[in-house]
């Protein structure tokens, strides 16, 4: 049979007209040569950062400083989702490929916004509990006619670019552990590389390369060892193990997840990978006796063919404050001290802007781009930060800046080769780290916001009445990477930044949490144009050209770590993709205000100690989604307005998991029935509570969290 089938195919091929012998006109024909020559087709956006070097700078200049004021909406597309949108849309051969919440993929006509296909990987909704920072996704990779997406439940799926039909799917994680994928897959030397998240719950970080043809695992690089003595999966881990205590908290997995940033240099044949924070944050518990704890908070350069490490640079040795180095990395060639250098630029959470020689990993410079109290400076001789002991919190609580979300998080930067500036979405905030005397690692229990977020927040009387925790105003910072100094900044009044795009039209585009999308003069920071879109924007814009028309497009939909938990808004967060062009006359889709809720809760008789425990447990397990003080951010059900049915079935929901299909997982593994009751009693007090912000709390926050930008910038 095999011979006959093969012969038949051969016969057909020989007899087809020549024009049909070529590969079908097919969609998504991206390959190595095409991405190498990406600047020759500036109308496309072929890979995550547009080019291998991830500069996120568009060479298009139809829209410029002189005419940007006549930008108008070209089209809009409703994603049908209500949670955070963080993706970079790719644009290939007139088709836009974007992702949304729950790892859904959208293929649209990039000139009209008309949907061509849509793929829902049907992630079980209870898996959302494993997502520290919302069920977001940052985009797809496209390669040789296929679209690749990572899913919240850890699958890597290949889709046919023309139809959206799955070709293959592999599970890249142990489903028994709280791994997630939110990052975009990258292509390096024809391999698909994907990492994962989960360090806030306790997992072991790694990234893997797969064969794009069939999903076969080619290699895997673990970022931390699994034991001190070994055996180790690869030789780099034997070296890394020497930087950990024998008594390290191995059971926590140690973290070091690779959840976002990568870049590839085809000339040097190096893949750069950013590594995340520790499980757990408290380094005295994690690795008693110290050590650098490689490869936490590091930038790794590996060979894409083998996964062999060539060099590494650790931004935060002995990571202690959730200072991931997973932030966007840009590759550029810059003249530094009279010589041309191939550099890698990163502004990780820890507040320092790093310029590394990307051939060797040598530190060229590191300066503070934002207030940073944890270290005085980075020693240029050793390449290591000089920590301040005041930031050491294992025994004594400490206010430390940057806060846990970082001075810069996942929101992509851009680099404008014309101005030589890097445009960074920056946040300013301070975090109060409190050690917990009786902390012990519990699988599946989140410790993200300190070892015991409940204990920390319990110290702030009335914090629940604040609209968000900390002030963390955001800004668009234009940074000179050679001089290591600020050129200009544009301030926003919300705590949620948006990703950046620069263009050859002399512009920088950025959205913000208040739902404005703006264009700035790339040299001066003057705001030249702004559109009020109504829905908060976090995602990075892209620019592309079809039929001679330049478009700028961005996803709008708030959520994620900064938007989902501590910010509140009173509109429905209906996600949308918006595209603008000069003279566009489209109408923005309407924004729907949420109706006021109705309180059906009744007081629950319980001791004040039990109520306080409920308050603490709520902060630790529920606040992440349901908001501070049980005031929903707007993304999840507002528990103050829980219906009688919900209140009656409280334990069935919280412990029994009867609403797991809708996203409310069972918490029976971390809460007892008594504790569930204590949480319910606390939520009832919030429902029946009249807002009255304690002045003491406000004063404390004003003094300690909403710090002036200059406070720590010595
Ligand atoms: Ca983290």
Image (spheres, helix red, strand yellow):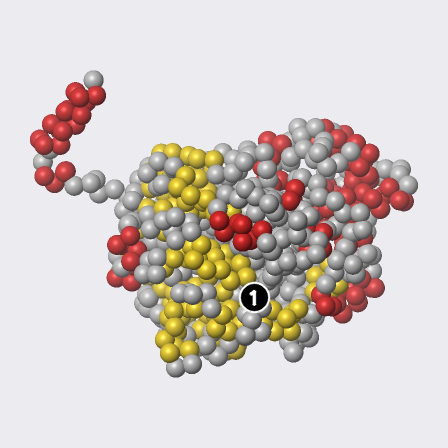
Residue 306's spot in the image, x, y percent? 39, 48
Label 1's element?
strand
Viewer-closest of 503 and 196: 196
Quadrant the N terminus occupies? top left
Quadrant the C terminus occupies? bottom right
Q: Residue furthest top?
A: 1
Answer yes or no: is residue 302 visible: yes
Answer yes or no: is residue 257 visible: no
State the residue at coordinates (25%, 42%).
26
Residue 68's spot in the image, x, y percent? 40, 69
| Residue under label 1 | 426
Relative to 668, 136 lies left or right: left
Residue 201's spot in the image, x, y percent? 64, 44
Viewer-closest of 213 and 71: 213
- Say above or below: 528 vs 658: below
Residue 485's spot in the image, x, y percent? 52, 78
Image quadrant in which you'd find residue 509: bottom left
Q: Residues within 10 Å of mark 1 (few under 14, many from 20)?
A: many
Relative to 151, 35 lies left or right: left
State the residue at coordinates (70%, 61%).
431
State the residue at coordinates (80%, 51%).
437
């Amino acid at each position: 049979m095999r011979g006959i089938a093969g012969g038949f195919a051969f016969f057909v091929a020989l007899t087809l007209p020549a024009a049909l012998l070529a590969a079908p006109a097919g969609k998504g024909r991206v390959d190595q040569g095409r991405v190498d020559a990406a600047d020759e087709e500036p109308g496309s956006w072929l890979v995550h950062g547009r080019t291998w070097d991830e500069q996120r700078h568009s060479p298009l200049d139809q829209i410029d400083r002189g005419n940007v004021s006549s930008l108008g909406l070209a089209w809009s597309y409703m994603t049908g989702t209500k949670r955070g949108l963080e993706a970079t849309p790719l644009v290939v051969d007139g088709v836009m490929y974007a992702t949304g919440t729950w790892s859904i993929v959208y293929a649209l006509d990039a000139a009209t916004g008309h949907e061509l296909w849509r793929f829902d990987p049907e992630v079980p909704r209870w898996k959302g509990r494993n997502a520290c920072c919302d069920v977001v996704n940052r985009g797809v990779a496209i390669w040789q006619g296929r679209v690749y997406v990572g899913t919240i439940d850890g699958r890597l799926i290949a889709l046919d670019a023309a139809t959206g039909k799955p070709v293959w799917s592999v599970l890249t994680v142990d489903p028994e552990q709280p791994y997630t994928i939110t990052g975009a897959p990258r292509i390096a030397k024809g391999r698909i590389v994907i990492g994962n998240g989960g360090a806030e719950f306790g997992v072991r970080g790694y990234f893997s390369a797969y064969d794009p043809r069939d999903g076969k695992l080619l290699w895997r690089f673990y970022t931390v060892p699994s034991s001190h003595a070994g055996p180790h999966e690869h030789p780099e881990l034997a070296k890394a193990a020497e930087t950990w205590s024998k008594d390290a908290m191995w059971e926590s997995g140690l973290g070091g997840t690779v959840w976002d940033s990568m870049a590839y240099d085809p000339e040097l044949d190096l893949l750069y990978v950013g590594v995340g924070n520790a499980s757990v944050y408290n380094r005295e518990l994690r690795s008693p006796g110290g050590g650098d704890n490689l490869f936490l908070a590091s930038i790794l350069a590996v060979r894409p063919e083998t996964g062999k490490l060539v060099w590494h640079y650790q931004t935060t040795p002995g990571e202690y404050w959730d200072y991931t180095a997973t932030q966007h990395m840009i590759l550029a060639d810059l003249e530094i001290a009279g010589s041309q250098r191939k550099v890698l630029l990163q502004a990780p959470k820890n507040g320092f802007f790093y310029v590394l020689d990307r051939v060797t990993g040598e530190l060229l410079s590191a300066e503070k781009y934002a207030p940073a109290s944890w270290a005085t400076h980075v020693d240029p001789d050793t390449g290591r930060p000089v920590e301040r002991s005041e930031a050491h919190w294992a025994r004594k609580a400490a206010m430390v800046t940057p806060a846990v979300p970082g001075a810069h998080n996942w929101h992509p930067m851009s680099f404008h080769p014309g101005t030589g500036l890097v445009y960074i979405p920056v946040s300013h905030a301070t975090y109060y780290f409190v050690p917990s005397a009786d902390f012990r690692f519990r699988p599946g229990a989140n410790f993200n916001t300190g070892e015991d977020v409940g204990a920390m927040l319990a110290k702030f009387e009335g914090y629940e009445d604040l609209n968000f925790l900390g002030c963390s105003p955001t800004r668009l910072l234009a940074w000179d990477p050679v001089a290591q100094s600020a050129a200009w900044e544009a301030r926003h009044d919300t705590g949620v930044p948006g990703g950046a795009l620069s263009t050859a039209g002399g512009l920088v585009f950025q959205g913000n949490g208040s739902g404005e999308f703006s264009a700035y003069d790339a040299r001066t920071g003057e705001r030249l144009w702004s559109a009020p879109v109504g829905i908060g924007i976090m995602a990075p814009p892209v620019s592309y050209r079809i039929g001679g028309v330049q478009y700028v497009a961005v996803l709008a939909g708030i959520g994620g770590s900064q938007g989902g938990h501590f910010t509140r808004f009173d509109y429905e967060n209906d996600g949308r993709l918006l595209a603008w062009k000069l003279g566009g006359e489209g109408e923005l889709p309407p924004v729907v205000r949420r109706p006021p809720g109705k309180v059906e809760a009744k007081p629950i008789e319980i001791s004040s100690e039990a109520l306080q425990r409920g308050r603490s447990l709520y902060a630790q397990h529920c606040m992440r989604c349901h908001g501070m003080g049980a005031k929903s951010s707007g993304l999840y059900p507002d528990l103050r307005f829980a219906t009688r049915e919900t209140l009656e079935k409280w334990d069935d929901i919280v412990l029994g998991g009867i609403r797991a299909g809708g996203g409310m997982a069972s918490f029976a593994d971390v809460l007892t029935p008594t504790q569930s009751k204590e949480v319910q009693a606390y939520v009832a007090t919030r429902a029946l509570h009249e807002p009255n912000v304690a002045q003491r709390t406000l004063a404390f926050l004003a003094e300690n969290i909403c710090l002036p930008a200059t406070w720590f910038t010595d």
